[in-house]
Image (cartoon, rainbow, N blue to C red):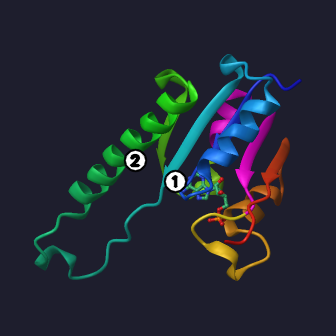
Amino acid sequence: MYNKVIVAVDFSDSSRRVVDRALELVGNDLNRLEIAHVVEPIPTVWGMESYSINPIDLQNKILESSANLLQELGDKTGIDKSRQHTLLGTPAVKIRELQDQLKADAIVIGSHGHSGWKVMLGSTAVKLLHGATVDVLTVFIPEE
Ligand code: AMP
């Protein structure tokens, strides 16, 4: 059995299904499961200072609401707050960094997320599979 598994969620409708599969993979041992969501940085563009929205404030608000959503999912599935990770950056890069940091030996992701079925396999899934140094389980998400 795997020692430490990271399940990556994007809060799409299929997230619960992905977490449930990850729980099965660790034999429902919650000490072996970490859950992660990555917030992508808001691009700052030239002339943005003339808008009333401060991109840093907006970024922080998104991080905060993502942490709340992750906590909701954690509460529903029993994953403790200490095992919930809300990160800022490129999803595949940050998940791989977390994998190194936690010495995780497997990653669980959905085959498709918000990017939907326009592509054969979601872009985060493809990026994580390329150059993976641990097992990556893609949970099949049927087309709606
Ligand atoms: P996508 O590549 O967007 O179709 O998403 C495929 C899967 O990658 C999703 O089901 C999630 O498991 C994972 N994923 C996508 N975006 C994120 C994100 N921002 N943070 C964490 N996991 C993500």
Give the residue at mark 2: 66
Which contiguous range is marked in magenta? Answer: 96-111
Q: How many marks?
A: 2
* Kind of residue at badge 2: Ser
Residue 124 is a magenta residue:
no
CB contact under 8 Å: marks 1 and 2: yes
Tell me where residue 3 sits by quadrant. Answer: top right
Is 105 placed above or below 137 here?
Answer: above
Tell me where residue 140 sits by quadrant. Answer: bottom right
Residue 11: image tag:
1
Q: Residue at x 46, y 40 (%)?
A: 70
| Mark 1 secondary-structure assignment | loop
Residue 110 is a magenta residue:
yes
Question: Which quadrant of the render holds ligand 1?
Answer: bottom right
The x, y position of residue 7, in whole percent, is 67, 40
Is 85 placed above or below 93 here?
Answer: above
Pick the quarter of the image with the N terminus: top right
The x, y position of residue 119, in whole percent, is 73, 79
**Nearer to us in this view, 57 or 9:** 9
N-term-proximal mark, 1 vs 2: 1
Whether residue 3 is visible here, answered yes or no, is: yes
